[in-house]
Image (cartoon, helix red, strand yellow):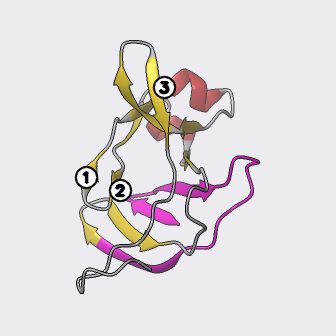
């Protein structure tokens, strides 16, 4: 999923634990530099959110890149990809939510709850 800003593009990927892309559907703009989508999945399957910038380095070489994910409308811990990491060809990656001191819970797909009260 690409997010465009002026002459820069941020490429966001949702992957499984092995780094294989998960298919995204219903991708739509929801605000300035924001997108949303849905992903068919198996309950309990873990996933990662990765991002990288494609931009003219001379214009954006000193800028860090922050990602703020929302899962089912709930804000998660944000991540920063520093300018030096970008210059080294690295990408940002979030794989869970901090739930305590030195403790995090991996991102996992949950059971879908419908408005009728039954689980899918």
Instruction: Using the image, determine if residue 114 lies above or below residue 41.
Output: below
Secondary structure state at the residue bearing disc 3: loop
Mark 2 Cα shell of 10 Å, populated few (<14), some (14-19), many (≥20): few
Picture residue at 61% right of the left edge, 56% below the top: 45
Is 41 in front, or is 58?
41
Instruction: Using the image, determine if residue 65 lies above or below residue 4.
Output: above
Secondary structure state at the residue bearing disc 2: strand
Q: Position of residue 16 (x, y in %)?
A: 67, 54
Residue denoted by label 2: 71
Residue denoted by label 1: 74
Mark 1 vs mark 3, foreground winner is: 1
In the rendered image, which quarter is residue 24 located in? Answer: bottom right
Which segment did they paint magenta?
1-29
Q: Position of residue 36 (x, y in %)?
A: 37, 69
Q: Earlier in the sequence, mark 1 or mark 3?
A: 1
Disc 2 vs disc 1: Cβ atoms closer than 8 Å?
Answer: yes
Picture residue at 43% right of the left edge, 72% below the top: 37
Disc marking residue 82: 3
Mark 3 vs mark 2, foreground winner is: 2
Mark 3 Cα shell of 10 Å, populated few (<14), some (14-19), many (≥20): some
Disc marking residue 7: none
Q: CA distance from mark 3 to mark 2?
A: 23 Å
- Give yes or no for residue 102 being in the magenta stretch: no
Q: Which image quarter is the C terminus in?
A: bottom left
Q: Position of residue 60 (x, y in %)?
A: 45, 37
């Amino acid at each position: 999923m690409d997010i465009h800003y002026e002459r820069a593009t941020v490429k966001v990927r949702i992957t499984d634990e092995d780094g294989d892309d998960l298919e995204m559907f219903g991708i739509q703009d929801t605000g300035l530099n924001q997108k949303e989508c849905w992903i068919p999945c198996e309950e309990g399957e873990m996933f990662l959110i990765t991002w990288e910038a494609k931009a003219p380095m001379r214009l954006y070489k000193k800028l860090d890149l922050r990602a703020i994910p929302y899962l089912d409308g709930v804000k998660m811990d944000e991540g920063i990809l520093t300018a030096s990491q970008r210059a080294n060809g690295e990408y940002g990656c979030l794989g869970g939510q901090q739930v305590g001191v030195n403790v995090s819970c991996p991102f996992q797909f949950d059971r879908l709850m419908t408005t009728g009260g039954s689980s899918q």
